[in-house]
Image: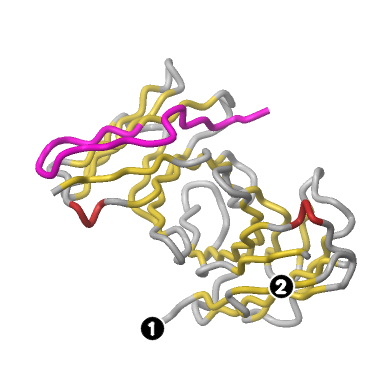
Amino acid sequence: DQQVKQNSPSLSVQEGRISILNCDYTNSMFDYFLWYKKYPAEGPTFLISISSIKDKNEDGRFTVFLNKSAKHLSLHIVPSQPGDSAVYFCAAAGTSYGKLTFGQGTILTVHP
Amino acid sequence: DAMVIQNPRYQVTQFGKPVTLSCSQTLNHNVMYWYQQKSSQAPKLLFHYYDKDFNNEADTPDNFQSRRPNTSFCFLDIRSPGLGDAAMYLCATSRKGLAGDNEQFFGPGTRLTVL
């Protein structure tokens, strides 16, 4: 039973354009959502997060949108850069101690 | 730089031969986690320590054990590795582990191969 799903295994975008990565969840107890970025041979690194009391959080080129009624969140990267090419994981947490449930990841490739 | 270190980065073991993976942190975080990630799948939490308090996930096989002798170190022991245990093992830490403060810091992972 996969509670966090990233339905697109991969996404290819031209440099300078917008990248939109999507994530759906099923557990209504989740109240905190995070995006992680992972380069090959490295561990995931935290990118941006959003609490369920908000519907948008922005940090530079990265914006996360949360639609609680649809149990959907998305990560927008504008403008996309070749250095953004990586695997992006969506993760969700509820009230239990720091436990994160991850999606399976989306491979983003940004072409020069 | 404060960080999460995993050794070794690559580990090869034989079917049934016990293996230990290690993780250390210089962040002084309360919580340490072990995840298993198989190819093209989501990282799956195996267990975590909140200080010395051990928390096992319900579906973590008995074959997997963990030790945390002090704040800085945490070990993953696989007592009898099977071919299905070949995966990337990720260690992570977080400061408090409570909801709303869930940012976890990951090590680079140990890739385990079982022959």
In percent of the image, x 68 and y 77: which residue is there?
A: B22
| C-alpha span from label 1 to label 2 | 29 Å
* Residue B85 percent location from the top left of the image: 76, 56
The residue carrying pointer 1 sits among few (fewer than 14), some (14 to 19) or many (20 or more) residues within 10 Å by Cα, namely few
Q: Amino acid at mark 1?
A: Asp
Q: Please indicate whether residue A63 sits to the left or right of residue B96 in the image.
A: left
In percent of the image, x 17 and y 45: which residue is there?
A: A80
A80 versus B49 height, above or below: above
Q: Is there one chain holding both mark 1 and mark 2?
A: yes
| Element type at mark 2 | strand
- The residue singled out by tag 1 in the image is B1
Q: Please indicate whether residue A80 sits to the left or right of residue A35 in the image.
A: left
Quadrant the N terminus of chain B occupies: bottom left
In percent of the image, x 83 and y 65: which residue is there?
A: B65
* Residue B28 percent location from the top left of the image: 54, 78
Tell me, for residue B12, which label it has, or none: 2
Q: Amino acid at mark 2?
A: Val
Q: Please indicate whether residue B34 sits to the left or right of residue A66 in the image.
A: right
A5 drawn magenta: yes
**The magenta segment:** A1-21
